[in-house]
Image (cartoon, rainbow, N blue to C red):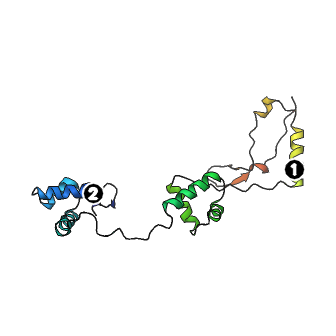
Amino acid sequence: MPWNKAAGKRHETTLNERVRIIELRSLGMSFPQIEAETGVSRAQAHRIYWRWKMYGNINPQTPRTGRPPKLNDRDKRYLAQLSDVHPRVPARELLHESRLDVGVSTLGHSLRSLQRRVILARRKPWIGPHNRRRRKRWCRLRRKWKISVWRKHCYTDEVYLQIATGTGYRRKCDDFPDPMPPMI
């Protein structure tokens, strides 16, 4: 496995690289020359050439070590299909729906590898009878406003605004008194 200086990671040599190493060695090049030509370390080039001489095989002897992936391609496609059908469902519910034996983080990793995202919707406050009456009263008081009056105001829904810079002091927009402009 040569060191890939650009990426900073090791990678397995491709079939074309291995064939090129054997060709160059058969032409009489030394391993340092092969390293300069192909970018594969001389130790790795030597192992590839030795394996070809001894066994007549240029493929790696064993697959790479490490834990096998928990989800196969079919499971990932199924998760992608579920996330397309239910785009706003939280990851935990998507996992329950899929009936796969994995964790929520594994589900998230596999969906991100497929360029899918599970977006958690924020909980909206329940509008009780008291709040409903207040909202209706607010609307009734302002129903005769002209467009020019509406354009002078910025309305938000419980968004936090920072009052002073650098202090970290915050207040809700709902806490500010709402002066009612005169009817025009």
Horizontally, residue 34 falls left or right of residue 97, namely left
> Of all residues shown, which one is farthest toward the left?
28
Mark 2 vs mark 1, CA separation in Å:
70 Å
User: Residue 141: x and y, percent?
Assistant: 89, 39
The residue indicated by pointer 2 is: 15
* 10 Å crowding of disc 2: few (<14), some (14-19), many (20+): few
- Residue to which mark 1 is pinned: 132
Residue 133 at x, y = what percent?
A: 90, 49
The x, y position of residue 162, in whole percent, is 67, 50
Quadrant (top left, top right, bottom left, bottom right) of the N terminus: bottom left
Amino acid tagged 1: Arg
The quarter of the picture where residue 182 lies is top right
Quadrant location, the C terminus: top right
Which residue is painted at 24% across and 63% down in the image? 58
- Identify the residue at image location x=85%, y=39%: 180
* Image label count: 2
**In front here: 124 or 119?**
119
Above or below — where is 180 with respect to 165? above
Q: Amino acid at mark 2?
A: Leu
Residue 82 appears in the figure: yes
